[in-house]
Amino acid sequence: MDDATHEHGAADYTHWLNDDTDFQQCFVCGQRNPFGLQLVFRSDGTRIMADFMGEARHQGFPGVVHGGILASILDEAMGRVSVLEHRWAMTGKLELRYRAPAPINVTLRVFAEATDSRSRLIRVKGWIARVDDPSVIVCEAEGLFLPLPKKVRDEAVANYPGLADFFPPATP
């Protein structure tokens, strides 16, 4: 099946936001990863979003989601912005600023959007806010994302053939 003619239409690549292949082991989004966060991503057309509620097992300080978990969530959401342009990217640089504690048992929402897009990089900003008070930003980030290397794509597809349809063709 051609990448541009999936069941969702020629211009709709949002079905790539969530892995439904034979892999699904990503720490942040893999639905088959029993130790992962199992986030489900969505888009409003220009931004990527997902919700997360930290549990006791996600703590750093007592009652607070570990900053590394927040960084992982931002990294994954920000990397998915490239999907809106029918391409996959990997993190080249990620800078974070922690602004407020992220309490466990409180729903958080991650947002990510491109600020600049070129053939060899995408600049992305992301932030995590409390759903119960969206004015409280717990963490924000800026990053550079680079095209998925052909070798990485080819190795992934060799090990998990279902990813051939999930990943768009890689650049050399």
Image (tube, grey):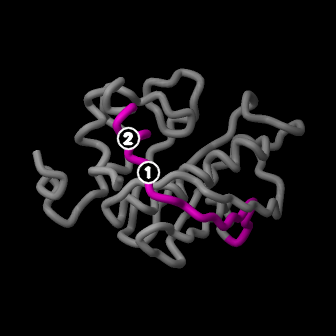
Residue extending furthest bottom? 116
The residues tagged by marks 2 and 1 sit, at their Cα atoms, a distance apart of: 7 Å
Amino acid type at circle 1 is Leu
- Res 121 label: none
User: What residue appears at the point 38 percent right and 68 percent down from the top-left corner?
Assistant: 44
Amino acid type at circle 2 is Arg
Q: Position of residue 52 (x, y in %)?
A: 59, 46
User: Based on the displayed image, in which of its 4 quarters is residue 42 positioned?
Assistant: bottom left
Stretch in magenta = 135-155
Return the residue nearer the eye: 50 or 20.
20
Q: Which residue is mark 1?
A: 148
Please report contact status of discs 2 and 1: CB closer than 8 Å, yes or no: yes
Horizontally, residue 4 falls left or right of residue 95, namely: left
Return the residue nearer the eye: 21 or 116.
116
Callout 2: 10 Å neighbours few (<14), some, many (20+)?
Answer: some
Residue 153 lies within the magenta run: yes
Residue 95 lies within the magenta run: no
User: What residue appears at the point 68 percent right and 58 percent down from the top-left corner?
Assistant: 94
Disc 2 is placed on an element classified as helix
Horizontally, residue 103 falls left or right of residue 5, namely: right
- Res 153 label: 2
Q: Position of residue 92 (x, y in %)?
A: 61, 57
Residue extending furthest front? 172
Q: Position of residue 137 (x, y in %)?
A: 72, 66
Above or below — where is 2 with respect to 57?
A: below
Sequence order check, earlier mark of 2 and 1: 1
